[in-house]
Amino acid sequence: MKNVDVANTRTFAVMGHTGSGKTTLIDALLFKLGVNDRLGSTDNGSSMADWTDSEKNRKITLQTKPFGALYKAKDGSASYMTFCDTPGYIDFYGQVIAASRVCESCLLVIDATSGIQLGTSKAWARANELGAPYAIVVTGLDRENADFAKVVEEVQGKWGAHCLPVVLPAPDAAVADVLAGSVPDSMADQAKDLSNRLTEIAAETDDSLIEKYLVGEALKPEEVASGLRKAVLSRKLVPIFACMPLKDKGITELLEGVLRLLPSPLERKMKDSEGNDIDPSPDAPFAGFVWHTVSDAYVGQLTFLRVCGGSLTTASDLVNSRTDEKERVAGLLVVNGKQQTNVDKATAGDIVAMTKLKNTKLNDVLCSSSGKITMKPLAFPNPVMSYAVKAKSRGDEDKIGMALNRVAEEDPTIKLMRNNETRELLLSGMGDVHLEVAVEQMKSRSNVEVLLSTPRIPYRETVTSTGQGHHKHKKQTGGHGQFAEVYLRVEPKQEGEEDWFINEIVGGAIPTNFIPAVQKGLVEGMTRGSIAGYPTTGIAVAVYDGSFHEVDSSEMAFKIASSRAFKEGMSAAKPVLLEPIMTVKIMVPEGFMGEITGDISHKRGRILGIEAEAGMQIISADVPLAEMFRYCAEIRSMTSGAGTFEMVLARYEIVPSNITEKVVASAEKEKQEVE
């Protein structure tokens, strides 16, 4: 693939808020590296990064994309840069999670006019979660109201004084490289102060260096360089780069800085599932992690693999550690946007795409047959928004499941499930735009159109008292008739009790061989409660009397009798409707607290606690699911896009009487429409 040592390989994820200039930076890097013969642009649709139709139309990054190219450094040495462009729009944060996991380091992009935004904070938190070293790139410095010093001050105030500029904006739309000593005279004093601070940080990484520094002995350039690399790796230094991608200013300095300061795969090794280092040397046993899959119109499924250790060639003998099945290497591709280049070898740090794999999926590990390795799977957030989905035309009903599954296979934050209680097919994701894009992909790839609607709420029913139920099923139709009589008691099931069915029959009032039929009838009856026809829960039933006929009694007769007796008993046991309650974790800047807490109360929610985390206010609350279906759009509207939330099902609670009336009326209306 490249005649470059692993020590000269860099793999990093480009992350940040939507609109911060990530894609423009990626296009400038690709132009500088010679991957593209011109500077791509999202404005005219020529970007190599945002090249899909959906991305061109929306002018935002929707998919993580890896890129790779050789870079010849200023000192003449060859290196290889692999980097991932990640979406900044919060709906697609799952792709940030995947890309950052397979990179040694992260580049956080901040717009010089906007400063730190929600996506910036999320990117920083992700790097922090991984313990990954990172650098900051300040873009848009050639725009009106750009303020590099203000951004640096904001970054240091939020993340610490160890965030220091190494490339500064200079007069005449140029940049000054402090580390390289390429600084105009007018900035000499500022550069000297920064250089002294960086030297001090470098010295602090080694006892012998700090001793030299404290006695006033000058450190050698190679000692400073080594110390700064250690400081970045240990996150004691976060270098800040000034960059103007559209004017090709600061791009070379950024690449040199990445090579000079950020770690190689040898310095920050990938871990196996036990937390042990995976040997990244080329002659080690091979291990590669599947972190991304894409359906390509020409070659089929592309499986993206991050090489963690060893070497991968088209002659490699691979085993999937999950299935223990062999996989054949049909080909290796470096994918740069639409460009796909065949390569014959990949080593640690490289990201390559493979085709025609038999049974290899996301989170799988491919390894050499000589050494099986497993790795922890990627952990993605739970969906926060769902739509009920159905085919627009009857002819597409059979295709819809397969079409949706194709989309969900590529994006693990898209979930597809059938709710057996509401009998709906649910499409769930991270927000409106996320689900809109999924539907667009389904239409373009599978020619299937769907209709989306608000899902039905999976209410349940229970009882709060004890009620008696009785039914005599008697029917004469000629020949054998049908006869069964059941008396029962319906009551709340006590906490901790496992058995819900209590057989209190004595004296053979109902023969033993018909008891299973009675129980089956009750199970069927419990699927539709007596209030609005929702499934029941938390109910115990005691059958204590009945009667039978020697000839006309049957299992079917007792099933019917017990089901109808249950409905009568439940109606007499003060039934109530239950609704799902979600525990919601809401993350917003402090300035929006009043509006958010007021809205929670309006939604019948209860605030459980408030705490600060990573510069955000975290509100924990319990809120009915019925109030949360549009919350993704609502919170973004209330917070100008700065708020996010997560939620999980906590429990079921009794629905207030005024809302119960509406639910019952709606259920009755649906019943009449069906009839």
Image (cartoon, rainbow, N blue to C red):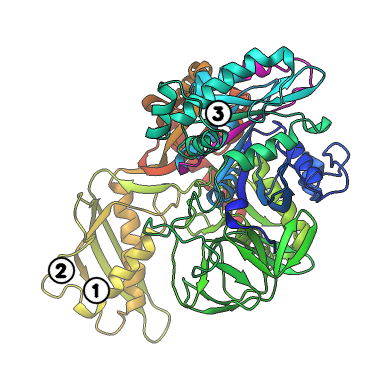
* Earlier residue among tags 2 and 3: 2
Q: Quadrant of residue 504?
A: bottom left
Q: Circle 1 sits on which residue?
A: 515
Query: Is residue 14 in sight in this rendering?
Result: no
Inter-mark Cα distance, 2 to 3 = 59 Å
**SS for callout 3:** loop
Query: Is residue 381 in sight in this rendering?
Result: yes
Q: Circle 2 sits on which residue?
A: 505
Q: Circle 3 sits on which residue?
A: 643
Which one is nearer the viewer's eye here, 268 or 433?
268
Which one is nearer the viewer's eye here, 200 or 41?
200
Task: Point out residue 225 in the picture as x, y percentages from the top left corner.
Answer: 55, 36
Q: The residue under label 1 is which amino acid type?
A: Ile
* Earlier residue among tags 1 and 3: 1
Which one is nearer the viewer's eye here, 221 or 398?
221
The residue shown at (28%, 53%) is 539
Inter-mark Cα distance, 1 to 2 = 9 Å
Q: The residue under label 2 is which amino acid type?
A: Ile
